[in-house]
Image: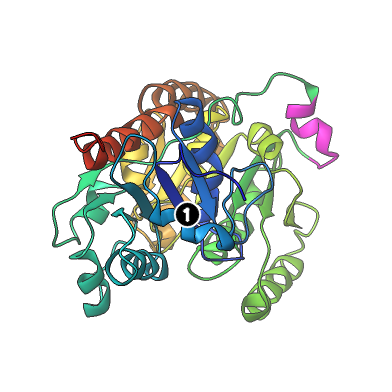
Amino acid sequence: MASLRHITVIAPHFKRRLSGVTSTVVQLVPEQQRLGLGIVTLGPGLPDHLPKMRWSDLPSLWRRPDGYRWRVWHARRNNEMLFGLLLKTVLRMPLKLLFTSAAQRHHSGYTKWLLRRMDAVVATSARSGSFLEVAHTVIRHGVDLSVFRPPQSHEDTIAATGLPGKYLIGCFGRVRHQKGTDLFVRAMIELLPHHPDWTAIICGRATAEHQRFADDLKQSVEQAGLSDRIRFLGEVDDIKPWYRRLTLYVAPSRNEGFGLTPLEAMASQTAVVASDTGAYAEMIVPGETGAVVPAGEYELLRDAIGEYLGDPHLPGEHGRRGLDFVRANFALYGEAEALVRVYGALIRNYPTDK
């Protein structure tokens, strides 16, 4: 059994399917380890390189970590909050409970009940924090600048893909109504005939419940005679080079919790047009690093995209500024350091020898 003597933070992950929370945990935990934090994950759906504890290790949580009276249980979902609460209040394990909230909606009575029982709460944006009725700290997500980087070689160009055109525009994520994939496809059908140098790609899979939605979009593209210039690539093995190959990235979501893709694009020196949902408006400086339009407003989204398609030099300029902005404000290590300070505030004043 792996020793938990030096582990002060448990990051549960109670979902097998890939999600935004998964991406956050996968990026953050190694960065927190580099800061010297003793942290492990618990649960399915995470890559093998992350530090893990087994379910059979749970009894070890009754034993306090070396030098401290508590560990931090850092939950990001309701079921993780509830499980931590049971460990703390029913099994009397020495835990401090922390929850990160990304939701931008009024919480249910059940969620509010759980939140009131947390020892600390973090919001991922000022907007998500505005829906909380408990004291909280705003810590925005960051992006790993060693993983998402500007183009450096021929492999980072549209020419390397074999796709037609000089410029690439893309929309990444699950293919579904919530993500606004239909708004992007509709805009491409309307705009691309006027901009022959551009090709559009959609990267991401459609789950079974959204397959009809995806099929309808593909049929619309075929009927418009644009199947060669609007490509559905599905779920690609590695999304990072695709960000670097883009001239413009579009995030047309109708609803998001936080949304990392604009940051990943900007870290790749790609300009962004995004809807005003999630934390997108906090990531983008309109007119300098990209454009922000009201969520679900098709005409405004189309027109914002059209400005970039009509002037290919503009996204290049905004992409360079966006890279500087992300480096200054959204580096992953900044998020990791801020969370470590929260952990410390929960446990640092309570060593076992006091």
Label 1, on which residue?
Answer: 60
288 on left or right of 262: left
Colouring used for the render: rainbow
Q: Is residue 156 magenta?
A: yes
Q: Is residue 223 above or below residue 50?
A: below
* Viewer-closest of 307 and 21: 21
Q: Which residues are magenta?
A: 155-164
Asked if one can make out residue 162 in the rendered structure from this viewpoint, the answer is yes
Residue found at the very far right of the displayed protein: 162
* Viewer-closest of 31 and 305: 31
Asked if one can make out residue 286 in the rendered structure from this viewpoint, the answer is no
In x, y percent, where is residue 240?
66, 37
Identify the image quadrant of the C terminus: top left
Label the magenta part by its dominant secondary structure.
helix
In the image, what residue occupies the spot 39% across and 58% down? Answer: 76
Q: Is residue 304 magenta?
A: no
In x, y percent, where is residue 286?
34, 36
Name the secondary structure under disc 1: helix
In x, y percent, where is residue 290?
42, 36
